[in-house]
Image (tube, rainbow, N blue to C red):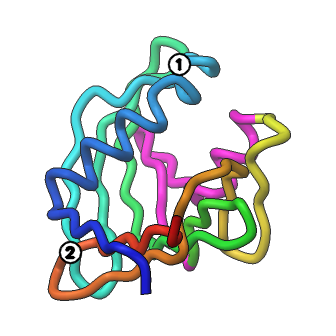
Amino acid sequence: MGDIMILNENEVKTCLEYGLKPFLNKYSIMIKESQLTINECIEMKAVVAYQDHTFDMQARFTLSYQNGKLIFENVDGKVEYLFLQLSLLSALKQMIHDEHLLFKDGSCCYVCDLPIQQLFIKDKHLCIELEKT
């Protein structure tokens, strides 16, 4: 087993926001505020701005890393705007068109080369097992 990094909720939130920020900026999407909790899965609530409109977003998902892909699995989420409620994955598919982002069967994969063996949730923390060097 390789070295393991253990991240708490605040650290996971910071990593996700930092990692996604350049990608989201490319599509004029801005996270205005967010909350993240870790239980059996990651739960995130956010206020997001897109093209001068503000949306509420909620999501539940797990994370894994396989074959050079960071995978947001079992995504259950919605985007709310006024009286409309859209599936989070459907909204993302419509807003973002990028060859590094793949959608399939309730999951969203981001192609990126990271030195990660596996990701898993344990005791309300995200554990990242790094590849052996």
Instruction: Judge by depth and name the residue closer to the eye, 31 or 109.
Output: 109
Discs 2, 1 touching: Cβ within 8 Å: no
Whether residue 75 appears in this view of the structure is no
Going by the image, does 97 lie left or right of 109? right
| Disc 2, SS | strand
Instruction: Identify the residue position indicated by label 1 in the image.
Output: 25
Point 43% across, 47% down: residue = 80
Tell me the tag on residue 125. 2
Count the labels in the image. 2
Q: Percent x, y for residue 69?
A: 68, 61
Point 79% across, 35% down: residue = 98
> In the rendered structure, does residue 79 fall within the stretch colored magenta?
yes
Q: Is residue 86 above or below residue 39?
A: above
First of labels 2, 1 by sequence position: 1
- Three-letter amino acid code of the residue under disc 1: Asn
Whether residue 3 appears in this view of the structure is yes
For the view shown, which residue lies furthest in the top direction?
52
Residues in magenta, as a range: 74-96
Q: Percent x, y for residue 106?
A: 67, 74
Point 22% across, 82% down: residue = 39
- Three-letter amino acid code of the residue under disc 2: His
Circle 2 packing at 10 Å, graded few (<14), some (14-19), many (20+), is many
When asked about the image quadrant of residue 122, the answer is bottom left
> In the rendered structure, does residue 16 fall within the stretch colored magenta?
no
